[in-house]
Image: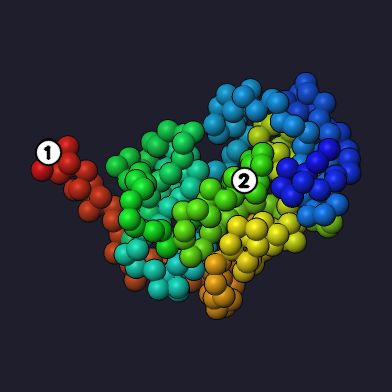
């Protein structure tokens, strides 16, 4: 099987049963290190519900991601510039970031925006300063092709979260394979993400076990390290320093509904 990221040769690692009925082999690329499933022909069934019932950590994960993103963006001097939450799902993260004073907008061609209505990203002359794509990379059937779509938005930084497998290859019983949902089809190592960044114009990559950042240009590493390592301490300070958009967003929507 050819790698869906770089086209290299892959080696079969193991087989698991996906969605309790499909025998699926997992392969690792000898060139870029991406671990990937067989051609995921079961995805229509897997996405019968956008958020799988096993995703009990969705709210806690968004709160944690806000601590990291808000701390990094504030330390990087982001004030009124627009940012995008790519594959934003129900709009949880967009709403959370607007609540702490960041001009975030929702973008997702497949989901319904329930919590950030009125703040959908509309293409125009503005270029986002940052794009977040949390819990996205593991869903990408063709990672390079799909990541290029994110890179094409032109942001200075792309901030992601995906769980990197321990060691050089994942174990067959690794929970992040998420065989119950069938939605995770690509799994990464740090060198795989570095390759993905180089191929898409984001050669400066910092990869942690859960959070990652891709940058077009070099940037002070301490900002990212502070956001990831000390976000729990720094975020409350950031929140106090930034005016929330919660009330002003409500007034803006009311004004639109009145036709003003």
Q: Are marks 2 and 1 in contact (CB under 8 Å)?
A: no
- Asked if residue 117 lies left or right of residue 62, the reply is left
Is 24 left or right of 148, judged from the image as shown? right
Residue 109 lies, with reference to residue 197, above or below; the image says above
Neighbours of disc 2 within 10 Å: few (<14), some (14-19), many (20+) = some
Nearer-N-terminus badge (2/1) = 2
Residue 31 is situated, as x and y percent measured from the top left of the image, at 82, 54
Q: How many marks?
A: 2
Q: Secondary structure at mark 2?
A: helix
- Residue sitting nearer the eye, 176 or 44: 44
Residue that mark 2 sits on: 145
**Residue 240 visible from this viewpoint:** no
Q: Residue at x 62, y 24 (%)?
A: 44
Q: Is residue 22 above or below residue 232?
A: above
Q: Position of residue 197 (x, y in %)?
A: 63, 60
**Where does the image place residue 203, in percent across and percent down from the top left?**
63, 66
């Amino acid at each position: 099987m050819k790698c869906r990221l770089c086209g290299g040769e892959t080696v079969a690692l193991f087989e698991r049963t996906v969605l309790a009925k499909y025998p699926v082999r997992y392969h690792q690329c000898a060139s870029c290190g991406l671990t990937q499933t067989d051609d995921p022909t079961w995805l229509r069934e897997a996405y019968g519900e956008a958020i799988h019932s096993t995703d009990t950590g969705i709210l806690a994960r968004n709160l944690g991601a806000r601590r990291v993103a808000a701390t990094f963006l504030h330390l990087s001097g982001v004030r009124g510039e627009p940012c995008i939450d790519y594959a934003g799902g129900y709009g949880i993260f967009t709403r959370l970031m607007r609540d702490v004073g960041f001009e975030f907008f929702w973008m997702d061609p497949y989901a319904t925006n329930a919590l950030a209505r009125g703040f959908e990203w509309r293409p125009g002359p503005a270029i986002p300063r940052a794009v977040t794509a949390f819990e996205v990379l593991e869903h990408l059937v063709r990672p390079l092709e799909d990541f290029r779509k994110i890179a094409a938005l032109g942001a200075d930084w792309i901030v992601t979260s995906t769980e990197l497998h321990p060691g050089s290859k994942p174990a067959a019983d690794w929970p992040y394979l998420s065989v119950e949902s069938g939605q995770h089809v690509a799994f990464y190592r740090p060198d795989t993400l570095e390759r993905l960044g180089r191929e898409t114009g984001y050669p400066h990559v910092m990869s942690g076990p859960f959070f990652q950042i891709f940058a077009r240009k070099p940037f002070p590493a301490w900002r990212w390290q502070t956001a990831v390592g000390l976000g729990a301490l720094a975020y409350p300070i950031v929140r106090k320093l930034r005016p929330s958009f919660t009330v002003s967003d409500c007034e803006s929507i009311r004004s639109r509904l009145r036709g003003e």
